[in-house]
Amino acid sequence: MAKILGDAVIKVNGGVLKTIEGSGRLQTGGLNGKTRKGGGKIHGPAKVMMESRISFDVLVDGDLDTAALREIDDATVEFADANGGPAWVVNRAWFVELGEIEEGEDSKMSVTLEGEPAQKVGAS
């Protein structure tokens, strides 16, 4: 039986980020379909290459270095199951956006990275 992705571990250049459980999201990128239209008509399909997009929340604590997150460029990002399930690697990833810091006991901040289309590796 194939393993199902559970809690994701996100690594940037080998370093594990302090992500909030259940917050990781990956759009794998690659070829997407697009409808070509104009002049009041549908002309047919087209394919466009899309970047991958990795988004997640990080724990806001004394170790959080927002400057280091903003400097992510040409990085290797791993999006993998904490228990050995499926995993993807995004090469040449870069920083896109930091969200607002949310206060409270579970203080967090959203982070978005983009990169080349993700490649599936590991368990299926």
Image: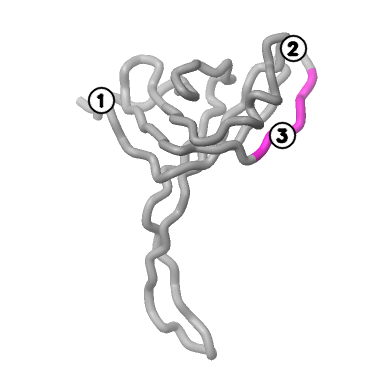
- 92 is higher (above) or lower (below) than 56: below
Per the rendering, the mark at residue 105 is 2
| Amino acid identity at mark 2 | Glu
Measure how far apart labels 1 and 2 are at the Cα level.
Answer: 35 Å
Measure how far apart labels 1 and 3 are at the Cα level.
Answer: 32 Å
As drawn, the residue found furthest toward the right would be 103
Q: Residue at x 50, y 16 (%)?
A: 16
As drawn, the residue found furthest toward the left would be 1
Look at the image and give the residue range highlighted in magenta. 97-103
Q: Is residue 55 left or right of residue 124?
A: right
Q: Residue at x 41, y 22 (%)?
A: 6
| Mark toward the start of the polypeptide (3 vs 2) | 3
Secondary structure under badge 3? Answer: strand
Secondary structure under badge 1? Answer: loop
| Mark toward the start of the polypeptide (1 vs 3) | 3
Per the rendering, the mark at residue 123 is 1
- Image quadrant for the N terminus? top left
| Amino acid identity at mark 3 | Gly
Residue 95 lies in quadrant = top right
Residue 42 appears in the figure = yes
| Amino acid identity at mark 1 | Ala
Residue 79 lies in quadrant = top left
Residue underneath mark 3: 99
Q: Is residue 100 magenta?
A: yes
Where residue 64 sits in the image (x, y, percent)? 68, 16
Give the label, 1 or 2, closer to the camera: 1
Q: Residue at x 43, y 44 (%)?
A: 116
